[in-house]
């Protein structure tokens, strides 16, 4: 099988723990691109937070695309402008803001590529250190919101977030996607937006079959696209459930050039 599209998650998959792309991964990706493979970065990050990695891999060219906000946006990598976007409605966002606050969770949201919080805290500071995005304080989120938002994220202890998911499942069914991107990050997107749906949308746009696509990830938000691939790959450091669903599990972790391993096995 000749694979035509390779989609990789970023944090804990493509990126080392120090948030860099190893030389080995970079060289392997560039070899795949030379062979005509469409390489797509697909992340829960904001578009602007992906920009430097897009440039490093020479993906900042006209006609190339990236996926940000866990599938809520497809963007043109040459301009970083959205070409497709699915937002959470103002009403659903207000409900999530209220629910999060009532349950003493740290709530953050995103609009126009801004990282928005009521007030900065250690949670927003840690998030900023990972993504390079500065939090924008707006005061009361419910009073602030005047339009839809790209996604909503709750931060908190994993046990607490797990309890919250059970409460929310029947309420948001058919309206929103809910998933963990890290054990302490519970995220929400429009029902028409997740990594799998957006990968499918792109590969159909390119005229590729599911069998011609490889998707690589580590966490629960990546399951959507791992199931949407001809070969779904979990890196060695992936969550156990993600490894169970994968067609292939790398021997290498994100710190050991796992993307290089996948490219050498399936593409080169």
Image (tube, helix red, strand yellow):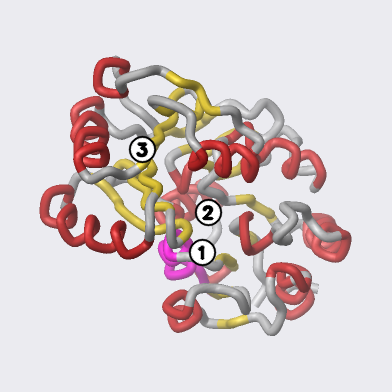
**Residue at image coords 12%, 49%:** 171
Q: Is residue 75 magenta?
A: no
Query: Which secondary structure, mark 1?
Result: loop
- Give the dominant element type of the magenta stretch: helix, strand or loop: helix
In the rendered image of this protein, does residue 172 appear above or below residue 76? below
First to last magenta residue range:
220-230
Query: Which secondary structure, mark 3?
Result: strand
Q: 183 and 4: which one is in front?
A: 183
Q: Do labels 1 and 3 touch, CB within 8 Å?
A: no
Residue marked by disc 2: 203
Question: Looking at the image, is mark 1 or mark 3 nearer the viewer?
Answer: 3
Mark 2 and mark 1: Cα distance apart in space: 7 Å
Residue marked by disc 1: 209
Confirm whether residue 35 shows in the render. Answer: no
Label 1 neighbour load within 10 Å: few <14, some 14-19, many 20+? some
Instruction: Return the disc, 2 or 1, that comes first in the chain's sequence.
Output: 2
> Which mark is on residue 131?
none
**Residue at image coords 18%, 61%:** 166
Instruction: Return the disc, 1 or 3, that comes first in the chain's sequence.
Output: 3
> Which mark is on residue 107?
3
């Amino acid at each position: 099988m000749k694979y035509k599209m390779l989609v990789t998650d970023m944090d804990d998959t493509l990126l080392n723990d120090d948030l860099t792309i190893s030389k080995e991964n970079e060289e392997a990706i560039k070899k795949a691109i030379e062979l005509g493979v469409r390489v797509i970065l697909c992340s829960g990050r904001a578009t602007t937070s992906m920009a430097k990695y897009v440039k490093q891999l020479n993906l900042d060219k006209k006609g190339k695309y990236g996926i940000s906000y866990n599938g809520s946006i497809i963007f043109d990598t040459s301009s970083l402008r959205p070409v497709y976007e699915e937002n959470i409605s103002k009403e659903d966002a207000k409900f999530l803001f209220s629910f999060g606050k009532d349950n003493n969770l740290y709530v953050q949201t995103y609009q126009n590529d801004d990282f928005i919080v009521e007030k900065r805290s250690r949670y927003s500071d840690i998030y900023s250190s990972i993504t390079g995005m500065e939090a924008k304080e707006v005061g009361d989120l419910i009073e602030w919101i005047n339009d839809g938002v790209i996604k909503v994220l709750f931060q908190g202890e994993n046990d607490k977030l797990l309890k919250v998911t059970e409460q929310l499942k029947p309420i948001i069914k058919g309206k929103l996607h809910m998933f963990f991107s890290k054990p302490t990050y519970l995220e929400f997107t429009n029902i028409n937006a997740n990594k799998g749906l957006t990968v499918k949308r792109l590969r159909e746009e390119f005229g590729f079959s599911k069998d011609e696509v490889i998707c690589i990830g580590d966490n629960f938000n990546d399951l959507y696209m791992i199931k949407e691939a001809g070969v779904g790959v979990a890196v060695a450091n992936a969550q156990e459930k993600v490894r169970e669903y994968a067609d292939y599990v790398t021997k290498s972790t994100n710190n050991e050039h796992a993307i290089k391993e996948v490219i050498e096995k399936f593409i080169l």
